[in-house]
Image: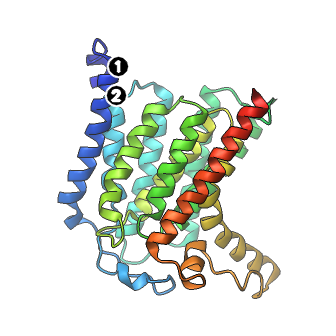
């Protein structure tokens, strides 16, 4: 680990090397390895889905690998962090195998893998951290089993809403960067890890900006979803994940709610005037361009996120 070799150096210099190094590793990795990534087959059900046909997908394989390597080299590691990195990489690999498969994996198979990874992340957290959570100026002491269950649900939900939001060039990456920055404002338990992920995402966004040259695929979105939930748990205020990632949650989550309610109630009219994911509604119903969707969704997330952080600061202070 370079971190331990560089302990005598200025900490700011080490962090700078880590951040610039992770960006450059991702940037050039995507540039030279995109040719070996599987090609997207297009999505008939999505707005402008045909435009993605033939583009390299599964770019998460490259930027998540760069992220894990940078963390292994520059972040002080303990057992908890090693396990988390392994699980994040595992989430990426399961997503990549789905990206590379000739036929998409079934929902049951992907769902079970998500549950295993979510349970692993939550259990690892409970074994190494306090299960007390801050909420509206008070502290709630949760039993370990209760926290484990709620934590697993949080990770599972984060994986799925992040995955569902990856339907517009630049959207998932941009919202993820904003959400990580907002979470960082609450606590810095995973500060350098978060910033390394941001740098790898910025390098990815260089190629994914509209019109994109490649796509992150499930390999990227699932790993990002794991990290977002984990970092929210690390702040000691996991409930804040809701306002700090509200656009991701609504964009990706409403479709899941719509599908579940329709199946349970056997109703075809529930939310019939709202197209999901919401980014498709914005493009098809409101006439927004891809760039408008990204910028406006980011603005909404920043306004709500900063407002929530300010409100929490007033209540806690």
Residue at disc 1, secondary structure = helix
Can you tell which quarter of the image residue 193 is in?
A: top left
Q: Nearer the viewer, residue 121 or 193?
A: 193
Q: Nearer the viewer, residue 31 or 103?
A: 31
Q: Is residue 272 above or below residue 187?
A: below
Residue 129 in sight from this viewpoint: yes
Residue at disc 2, secondary structure = helix
Q: Is residue 226 above or below residue 238?
A: below
Q: Is residue 93 left or right of residue 128?
A: left
Q: Nearer the viewer, residue 76 or 310?
A: 310
- Furthest toward the top, the residue is 8
Q: Quick one: label 1, few (<14), some, or many (20+) residues within 10 Å?
A: few
The N terminus, quarter of image? top left
The C terminus, quarter of image? top right
Q: Which mark is residue 11?
A: 1
The reply to whether dot 1 and dot 2 touch (C-beta < 8 Å) is: yes
Please provide percent x and percent y for residue 230. Answer: 57, 41
- Image point 35% across, 19% down: which residue? 11
Q: Which mark is residue 97?
A: none
Q: Quick one: label 2, few (<14), some, or many (20+) residues within 10 Å?
A: some
Please provide percent x and percent y for residue 129. Answer: 63, 27
Which residue lies under the disc numbered 2? 15
Please provide percent x and percent y for residue 115. Answer: 60, 54
Q: Is residue 154 left or right of residue 43?
A: right
């Amino acid at each position: 680990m370079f971190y331990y070799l560089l302990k005598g150096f200025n900490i700011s210099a080490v962090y700078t090397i880590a951040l610039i190094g992770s960006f450059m590793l991702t940037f050039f990795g995507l540039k030279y390895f995109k040719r070996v990534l599987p090609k997207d087959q297009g999505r008939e059900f999505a707005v402008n889905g045909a435009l993605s046909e033939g583009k390299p997908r599964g770019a998460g394989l490259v930027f998540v690998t760069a992220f894990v390597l940078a963390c292994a080299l520059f972040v002080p590691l303990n057992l908890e962090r090693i396990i988390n990195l392994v699980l994040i990489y595992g989430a990426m690999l399961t997503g990549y195998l789905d990206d590379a498969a000739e036929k998409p994996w079934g929902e049951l198979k992907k769902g079970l893998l998500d549950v295993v990874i979510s349970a692993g992340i939550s259990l690892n957290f409970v074994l190494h951290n306090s299960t007390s959570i801050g909420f509206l100026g008070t502290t709630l002491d949760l039993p370990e089993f209760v926290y484990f269950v709620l934590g697993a649900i949080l990770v599972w939900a984060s994986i799925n809403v992040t995955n569902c939001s990856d339907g517009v060039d630049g959207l998932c990456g941009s919202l993820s960067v904003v959400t990580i920055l907002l979470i960082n404002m609450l606590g810095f338990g995973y500060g350098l890890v978060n910033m390394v992920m941001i740098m790898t995402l910025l390098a990815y966004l260089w190629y994914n900006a509209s019109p994109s040259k490649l796509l992150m695929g499930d390999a990227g979105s699932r790993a990002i979803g794991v990290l977002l939930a984990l970092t929210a748990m690390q702040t000691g205020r996991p409930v804040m994940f809701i306002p700090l990632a509200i656009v991701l949650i609504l964009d990706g989550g409403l479709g899941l709610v719509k599908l579940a309610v329709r199946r349970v109630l056997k109703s075809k009219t529930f939310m019939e005037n709202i197209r999901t994911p919401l980014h498709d509604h914005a493009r098809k119903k409101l006439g927004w361009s891809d760039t408008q969707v990204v910028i406006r969704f980011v603005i909404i997330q920043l306004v709500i996120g900063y407002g929530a952080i300010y409100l929490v600061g007033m209540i806690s202070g």
